[in-house]
Image (cartoon, helix red, strand yellow):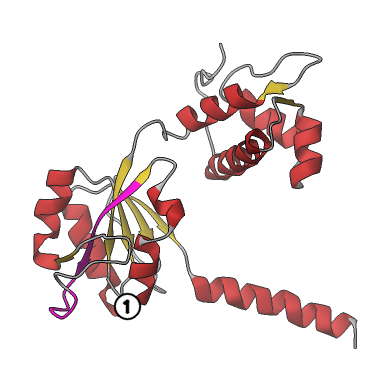
Amino acid sequence: MAGARRPGAEISDLTAKRLSVYLRSLEDLQAAGVTTVSSQAMAEKFGLNSAQIRKDLACFGEFGVRGVGYVVADLKDQITRILGLTRDRKVIIVGAGNLGMALADYAGFNAGGFRIVALFDNDRGKVGGRSRGGVPVLDMEALPQIARREKAGIAVLAVPAAAAQKVLDLVSRAGIKAILNFAPAQLKARPGVTLKAVDLKIQLENLVFHLARAEEVHR
């Protein structure tokens, strides 16, 4: 049955991440007016692995038609459902500095199943303001109440490293189970909370590593 996960199948985090890549690819194909696509054509166009595409999709059921390929709109809808993006997920951002404000107005955070409902900060000079897109900046003390009232399911941490663990504990106690951390700190999440880290410095260091290796080759 299409879209049905195989009983007992373990779905890795890497598979879930690749599904997001496939979704972006299908969105691009649909915008270009493409109605059907094979795994091979999709792989060649977007630099993917056709065997991996078929293997990942097989975790959730039978997709595609032999000799035709995948119907782009149908597969996009199926992956959207698998990823849980069929309804808006409310998101709060903690930290109304430059990064937090930029994230609040980032179009990708306010489309495709996500909606930023509030920013929080303990700086009285920022509380009461709004991002350029109109997201309100609220006092940290109101976070538990607002998070529960809005039924926020995701929190984004854009705070200094020294404050990150304390903020993580606060949003966890407020009932938020999914947290994206931009602070350059190793944090410990309580059981039942999914924590993902985005360390921009590590990414830059990785880029420099590859740049330095390329420079050595050309010396």
When the figure is inspected, residue 3 is found, relative to residue 16, above or below; the finding is above
Q: Position of residue 126 (x, y in %)?
A: 19, 76
Query: Is residue 125 found inside the magenta-colored segment of the image?
Result: yes
Residue position marked by numbered label 1 in the rendering: 160
When the figure is inspected, residue 22 is found, relative to residue 197, above or below; the finding is above
Comparing 146 with 135, the one in front is: 135
Q: Amino acid at mark 1?
A: Pro
Query: In this picture, which residue range is highlighted in magenta?
Result: 115-126
For numbered disc 1, what is the local secondary structure?
loop
Query: Is residue 154 found inside the magenta-colored segment of the image?
Result: no
For the point 37% across and 45% down, the residue is 114
Horizontal side of residue 93 vs 68, given as left or right: left
Horizontal side of residue 165 vs 34, given as left or right: left
Residue placed furthest toward the top? 1
Q: Position of residue 2 (x, y in %)?
A: 57, 15
For the point 58% across and 71% down, the residue is 203
Horizontal side of residue 50 vs 111, given as left or right: right
Comparing 157 with 118, the one in front is: 118
For the point 16% across and 53% down, the residue is 173
When the figure is inspected, residue 144 is found, relative to residue 3, above or below; the finding is below
Q: Position of residue 212 (x, y in %)?
A: 75, 82
Rendered image quadrant of residue 26? top right
Q: Quadrant of the N terminus?
A: top right
Residue placed furthest toward the bottom? 219
Q: Position of residue 186 (x, y in %)?
A: 39, 69
Mark 1 surroundings: few (<14), some (14-19) or many (≥20) residues within 10 A: some
For the point 59% across and 18% down, the residue is 61
Rendered image quadrant of residue 72? top right
Q: Quadrant of the C terminus?
A: bottom right
Q: How many marks?
A: 1
Horizontal side of residue 10 vs 110, given as left or right: right
